[in-house]
Image (cartoon, rainbow, N blue to C red):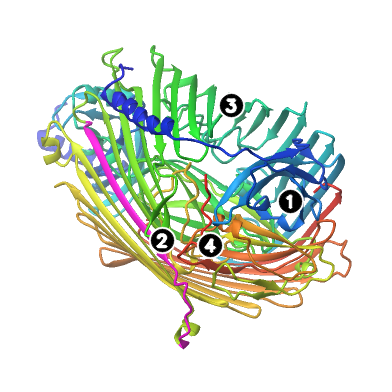
């Protein structure tokens, strides 16, 4: 039987229409945009090693009629030396993302994440050719789509010293080295971060702590302290965090988050548990300090005095490190770089309650409630420096009877008295 | 690694120049005092007797752990006797004898370190707590954990002392019914624990074994935070000044390395090694030190790494070692140091094994012993050092071809006590030989910092209101220069030079329980590139803190602006406020409010509110042997509209009620 052409055409049209309504329509990929679009490879570390790069491909699609769920896919990525240069390597990892159905003709963008590792061989090949950059490209499309699109990331081969800072590792812990602490309520606790990084430049980070009860559910981190510093090419630095809240009992999480530039990893939070002490603080009532007044300037004849504690065998007067010039009120003017092995550098702590290491002390008989520093002790003190002082009362057995609050004072600009060590 | 180049020859010359004046210095050291019965360990109440040298002319001062104890000393002829007024605490102490000369100068005439250990003792301290939390209400939790939540924690510290042996153990354990959220899928989290045993095998040597969470050896060999545990054994020979440590540490995301990058980058397994260090005095105020480090372990698989030798992700395992030495003047006048390092890594994806070398030489010099400027003392230190890494850039395309990386640093630092001025100038060079696209870089930087506190009497009424002032200023300049070949890389913006400066100042006031202040920082980074833009940073902040009676108040405001050419401007405001109240009947409460607002490209696109508060009542149970019981309530409200983060809106609150039991007790003579 011979079917007329017109009938055949109508039959084909009908079948086509039927197929169109019974199968999913393809999604046309119209644009691919990578983030970041440029990236400096950290050759300052070791160009013979592979370099991981986190990428996000934003793929824009438009459905043909009728709309239906679809998947956009890129089967492979390619490394090139220059836009029209040769392909020097191929990444066979397939990346894909589902595209939900949406109205016909409305563009929709889906994100595809890729953890790319730039192989050492690719970097070495670029170095051999003195190529200033490597291009990495991917082509996205639906397997039934008519159109595809290609996105390109430019990977610059530059020494990291001219690039931005990138944190490599962060050793986050509390003072003393532990990553988990149980402290009594009201204790002084600060986090410390040892950071290994590459490059040089300005870095901003924020210390965050969980709100009171949220650590028993979904943790809610709130910012505790923001800081911005310029790091030189030292490669390592140590930063001290703010004093952590310990007024209320419970478990809290602390973390360090890099804001600008962002780290390519998340710093795992450390934890501390605040517990009620077995001893109520009223059992060791504070010693009342009499003189000098808070903020006074320490001089050779400055007389420290306090109220007597019954049963005290000795008093210990202590001057504690407080960070330089706390009253200056800002950490903004603090030094840019704090190499991990340099001697501790004074910082402008905004936290007036911070009490640091013992600088100098004096042991006094329990019958006496006033004392002055000995001339030999001035060699430990810096001029124009902020300290805190406090008094502790001990029994004849050396047990703590009572302790005062600490009170701020500072030394004058002139070295008083002149007791420079004669080596 | 290639032969010693020009950089190394310059360094050798500098070392020689620094060494010559040091050798030429006349050095007449006064004879030291002698501590009689100078045992390495002492009883808590054991008196000290010191024989003074016969040339003693000044006053005597004695410091124990920086605490002056002269008042407890008795001088009998040439013998000084110090009897501790209270038993000294268990552990390490240091005693320093000083001679205070009539002109006010102080000379150190003796320094002794010792451990205080009771002959026999034991101690046990246990603490524990339990918390039951229920959440009566919440909103906005997509994946809410259970409403009732319990947690138990236990902490123990035990110690035992017998003659020269001491054993200590610490442990923390936590059970959490939400453990799968908090502790990586585990309900019970055995937190950090450590067992340490040390014994004096003789008066001259000591052995210490550690098991659990601890840093294996010196700080420069960093191991990263969590789940870092292992075992180490340390042997010290006091008279020889030698200490050696062997260790094996496993952990997550570890980092091993020294300044040169020697080490293994261990991401998930173990690293083992031995560290040997010795230090001996040479007389005439000179001493020398030698060190050796050997590491072996499973190497990185995540691509991270250190500068220098390690961190190759293709390696499965490897080993590395370094030898170092230094010669130092005890007065800090001159220090010479050097280190040679080598690593040998097995690669998993290549037939090539990677063998690297590096060295590091340096010196620091303080030219003047007692420098005075305008009547005030000053310290001036010069330092230079150089490094060279072998096989830093290695060619896979042409096996055997390597390119070294070399760097050099020179630094001058002057601290003048007159105005607390700290001046620093530094110069760094860093380059890789023979790679045109990695040009030689120069980094110059200078920094000046000072702080001023008026030490005169501020009698005007206004100062009594606003408090005593203090001022600090800090400025820095940095410049990066590039010697590029070919030069068109600069023109294309693929290489760029930078210069930056920053200046910050802080002004603060303090009066009794009230303090307040302001600070400001201006910084600019100029990038000489057509492809990249300059950046300008401006940060301002202000704070105030006040306490009256049982209430303390604090507030802090900070605004951070960044203007970057070819990028949207960004401004972030952060406002914080805290109120805390401690009542008399075990009642206490706190309230914290934090607000952060971000603007980018002059469009407000981020706004976050945190509001949290709580109250707690410590129930008086009357008997001090009973646990502490407290009842509490916590509430958190969190609202975020955060386009910057790309996570969309969050609006939720949570209300918690808590019952907490806490208990701590100690027994024994050791704590």
On the image, numbered disc 2 is attached to which residue?
Answer: B418
Q: Is residue A400 magenta?
A: no
Foreground pick, B469 / B62 = B62
Question: Magenta segment, which residues?
Answer: B438-461
Furthest toward the bottom, the residue is B461
Q: Which mark is residue B139?
A: none
Q: Secondary structure at mark 1?
A: strand
Q: Nearer the viewer, mark 2 or mark 4?
A: 4
Residue depth check, mark 3 versus mark 2: number of the one nearer the observer: 2
Q: Are marks 2 and 4 on the same chain?
A: no
Q: Pinpoint the chain carrying mark 4.
A: A
Residue B241 in which image quadrant: top right
Residue A16 image position (x, y, % from top left):
22, 39
What is the crowding at mark 2: few (fewer than 14 residues within 10 Å), some, or many (at least 20)? many
Label 4, label 1: how far apart the Cα atoms are: 52 Å
Residue B245 spot, x, y in % from top left: 63, 27
Let me know if marks 1 and 3 both belong to one chain. Answer: yes
Instruction: Locate residue A285, reporting x and y percent.
Output: 76, 70
Horizontal side, residue A413 vs residue B430: left or right = right
């Amino acid at each position: 039987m011979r079917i007329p052409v017109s009938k055949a055409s109508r039959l084909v049209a009908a079948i086509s229409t039927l197929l169109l309504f019974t199968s999913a329509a393809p999604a046309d990929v119209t644009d691919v945009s990578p983030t970041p679009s440029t990236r400096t490879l950290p050759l300052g570390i070791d160009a013979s090693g592979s370099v991981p790069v986190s990428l996000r491909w934003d793929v824009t699609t438009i459905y043909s009629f009728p709309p239906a769920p679809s998947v956009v896919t890129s089967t492979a990525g390619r490394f090139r030396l220059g836009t029209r240069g040769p392909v020097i390597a191929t990444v066979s990892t397939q990346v894909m993302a589902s595209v939900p159905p949406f109205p016909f003709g409305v563009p929709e963008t889906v994100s595809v994440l890729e953890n790319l590792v730039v192989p050492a061989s690719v970097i070495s090949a670029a170095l051999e050719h003195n190529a200033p950059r490597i291009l990495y490209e991917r082509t996205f499309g639906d397997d039934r789509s008519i159109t595809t699109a290609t996105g390109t990331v430019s990977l610059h081969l530059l020494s990291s010293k001219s690039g931005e800072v990138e944190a490599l590792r962060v050793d986050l812990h509390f003072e003393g080295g532990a990553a988990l602490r149980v402290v009594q309520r009201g204790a002084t606790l600060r986090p410390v971060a040892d950071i290994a990084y590459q490059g040089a430049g300005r870095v901003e980070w924020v210390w965050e702590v969980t709100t009171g009860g949220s650590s028993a559910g979904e943790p809610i981190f709130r910012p505790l302290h923001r800081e911005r510093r310029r790091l030189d090419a030292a490669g390592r630095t140590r930063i001290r965090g703010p004093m952590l809240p310990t007024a209320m009992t419970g478990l809290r999480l602390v973390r360090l988050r890099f804001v600008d530039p962002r780290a390519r990893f998340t710093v795992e939070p450390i934890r501390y548990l605040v517990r009620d002490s077995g001893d109520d603080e009223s059992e060791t009532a504070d010693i009342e300090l009499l003189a000098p007044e808070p903020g006074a300037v320490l001089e050779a004849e400055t007389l420290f005095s306090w109220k007597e504690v019954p049963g005290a065998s000795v008093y210990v007067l202590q001057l504690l490190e407080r960070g330089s010039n706390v009253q200056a009120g800002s950490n903004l003017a603090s030094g840019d770089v704090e190499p991990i092995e340099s001697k501790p550098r004074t910082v402008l702590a905004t936290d007036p309650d911070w009490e640091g290491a013992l600088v100098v002390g004096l042991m006094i008989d329990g019958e006496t409630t006033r004392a002055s520093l000995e001339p030999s002790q001035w060699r430990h003190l810096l001029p124009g420096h902020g300290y805190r002082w406090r008094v502790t009362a001990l029994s004849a057995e050396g047990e703590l009877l009572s302790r005062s609050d600490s009170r701020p004072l500072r030394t004058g600009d002139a070295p008083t008295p002149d007791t420079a060590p004669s080596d | 690694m290639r032969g010693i180049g020009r950089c190394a020859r310059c360094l050798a010359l500098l070392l020689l120049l620094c060494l010559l004046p040091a050798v030429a210095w006349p050095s007449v050291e006064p004879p030291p005092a002698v501590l009689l019965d100078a045992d390495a360990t002492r009883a808590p109440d054991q008196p000290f007797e010191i024989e003074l040298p016969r040339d003693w002319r000044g006053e005597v001062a004695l410091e124990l752990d920086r605490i002056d104890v002269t008042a407890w000393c008795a001088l009998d002829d040439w013998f000084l006797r110090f009897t501790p007024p209270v038993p000294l605490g268990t552990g390490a102490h240091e005693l320093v004898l000083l001679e205070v000369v009539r002109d006010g100068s102080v000379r150190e005439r003796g320094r002794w370190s010792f451990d205080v250990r009771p002959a026999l003792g034991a101690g046990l301290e246990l603490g524990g707590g339990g918390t039951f939390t229920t959440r009566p209400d919440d909103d906005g939790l997509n994946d809410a954990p259970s409403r009732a939540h319990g947690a138990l924690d236990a902490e123990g510290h035990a110690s035992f002392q017998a003659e020269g042996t001491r054993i200590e153990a610490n442990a923390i354990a936590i059970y959490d019914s939400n453990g799968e959220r908090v502790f990586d899928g585990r309900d019970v989290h055995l937190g950090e624990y450590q067992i340490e045993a040390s014994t004096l095998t003789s008066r001259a040597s000591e052995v210490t074994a550690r098991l659990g969470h601890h840093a294996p050896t010196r700080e420069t060999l960093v191991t990263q935070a969590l789940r870092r545990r292992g075992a180490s054994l340390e042997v010290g020979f006091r008279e020889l000044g030698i200490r050696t440590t062997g260790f094996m540490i496993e952990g997550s995301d570890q980092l091993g390395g020294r300044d040169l990058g020697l080490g293994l980058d261990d991401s998930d397994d173990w690293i083992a090694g031995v560290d040997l260090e010795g230090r001996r005095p040479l007389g005439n105020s000179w001493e020398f030190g030698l060190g050796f480090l050997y590491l072996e372990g499973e190497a990185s698989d995540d691509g991270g790494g250190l500068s220098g030798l390690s961190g190759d992700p293709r390696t499965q395992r490897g080993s590395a070692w370094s030898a170092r030495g230094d010669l130092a003047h005890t007065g800090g006048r001159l220090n010479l140091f050097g280190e040679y390092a080598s690593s040998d890594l097995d690669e998993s994806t290549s037939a090539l094994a990677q063998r690297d070398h590096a060295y590091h030489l340096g010196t620091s010099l303080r030219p003047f012993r007692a420098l005075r400027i305008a009547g005030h003392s000053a310290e001036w230190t010069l330092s230079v050092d150089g490094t060279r890494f072998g096989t830093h850039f290695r060619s896979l395309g042409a096996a055997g071809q390597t390119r070294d990386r070399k760097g050099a640093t020179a630094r001058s630092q002057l601290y003048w006590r007159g105005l607390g001025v700290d001046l620093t100038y530094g110069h760094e060079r860093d380059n890789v030989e023979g790679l045109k696209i990695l040009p030689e870089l120069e980094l110059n930087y200078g920094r000046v910092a000072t702080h001023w506190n008026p030490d005169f009497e501020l009698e005007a009424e206004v100062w009594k209101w606003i408090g005593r002032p203090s001022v600090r200023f800090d400025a820095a300049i940095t410049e990066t220069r590039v010697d590029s070949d070919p030069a068109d890389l600069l023109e294309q913006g693929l290489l760029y030079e930078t210069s930056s400066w920053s200046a910050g100042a802080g002004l603060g006031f303090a009066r009794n329980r009230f303090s307040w202040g302001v600070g400001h920082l201006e910084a600019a980074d100029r990038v000489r590139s057509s492809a990249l833009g300059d950046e300008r940073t401006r940060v301002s902040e202000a704070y105030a803190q006040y306490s009256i009676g049982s209430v303390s108040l604090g507030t802090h405001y900070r605004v951070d602006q960044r203007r970057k050419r070819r990028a949207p401007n960004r401004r972030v405001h952060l406002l914080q406020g805290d109120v805390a109240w401690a009542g008399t009947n075990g009642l206490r409460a706190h309230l914290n409010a934090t607000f952060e607002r971000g603007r980018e490209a002059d469009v407000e696109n981020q706004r976050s509110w945190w509001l949290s508060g709580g109250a707690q009542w410590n129930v008086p149970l009357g008997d001090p042997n009973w646990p502490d019981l407290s009842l509490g309530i916590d509430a958190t409200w969190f609202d975020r509209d955060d386009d910057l983060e790309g996570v969309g809106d969050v609006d939720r609150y949570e209300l918690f009620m808590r019952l907490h039991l806490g208990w701590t007790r100690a027994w024994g003579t050791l704590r």
